[in-house]
Amino acid sequence: MKYQLRIPIAIIVISLSSCHNFKNQPSKRIANNSDLIFAKGEKITNDNFTGTAYLHPMITADSLNFTSVGNVTFKAGARTKWHLHPGGQILLVTGGTGYYQEKGSPKRIIKKGESIKCPPGVPHWHGASKDEELIQVAITNTQKGATVWLEPVSDEEYNSFE
């Protein structure tokens, strides 16, 4: 009788263990993606960026609303060129760590949870830190014109702190 009880108990324990592991697998995948607020988007292929960056356009400006909104993901080391927005821009950092610099001002570190007002007409750049990606929502006022792209950020500018 003792031998007959061991086999069913062993089968139940193995079955429950297998079910438990199966249930945990999907939740691990979901947990890994839970930090993403918006889609990563498509790889940016123009020459206004150094390194690898992705854009997910969320709102396109039109004649009724002069605001464009996009989610931008910069891989570690990626950055924009120097540029300006005639109508200004707001950046909402939703993940990672990066840099932001206005022409004539020191570069600063930006982190998840921070927001930045890019003043109208002021040249600036932003991107990921050397070791960590940066995810941001860029809200751009296009009423006074499109983004004006300038020269690339040099490696010296990117790597230095004043």
Image (tube, rainbow, N blue to C red):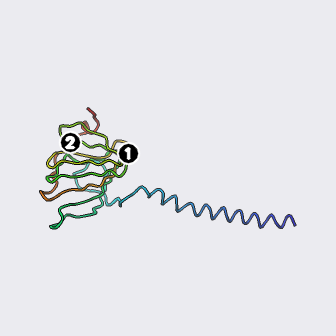
Q: CA distance from mark 2 to mark 1?
A: 21 Å
Q: Which residue is more in the foreground, 90 or 153?
A: 90
Quarter residue 55 falls in: bottom left
Q: Position of residue 19 (x, y in %)?
A: 63, 65
Residue at (28, 34) in percent of width and height: 161
**In-front residue for pair 119/156:** 119
- Circle 2 is placed at which residue position? 102
Residue 91 position within the rendered picture, expressed as x and y whole percent measured from the top left: 27, 51
Quadrant (top left/top right/bottom left/bottom right) for the C terminus: top left
Q: Quadrant of the N terminus?
A: bottom right
All told, the count of numbered labels is 2
Front residue of 113/81: it is 113
Disc number placed over residue 101 in the picture, else none: none
Q: Is residue 28 left or right of residue 93?
A: right
Secondary structure under badge 2?
strand
Task: Please tell me whether residue 7 is drawn above or below residue 98 in the rendered image.
Answer: below
Task: Tell me if residue 49 comes above or below residue 108 in the rendering.
Answer: below
Q: Residue 133 location in percent, x, y?
A: 36, 48
Q: List the residue tagged with mark 1.
A: 132
| Quarter holding residue 33 | bottom left
- Residue type at tag 1: Glu
Looking at the image, is mark 2 or mark 1 nearer the viewer?
Answer: 2
- Identified at 16% across, 45% down, the residue is 122
Q: Is residue 98 left or right of residue 146?
A: right
Dot 2, how many residues are within 10 Å of its Cα: few (below 14), some (14-19), or many (20+)?
some
Of callouts 2 and 1, the N-terminal one: 2
Three-letter amino acid code of the residue under disc 2: Glu
Question: Marks 2 and 1: CB-CB under 8 Å?
Answer: no
Q: Secondary structure at mark 1?
A: loop
Q: Position of residue 136 (x, y in %)?
A: 31, 52
Residue at (37% x, 58% y) in the render: 37
Outermost top residue: 162
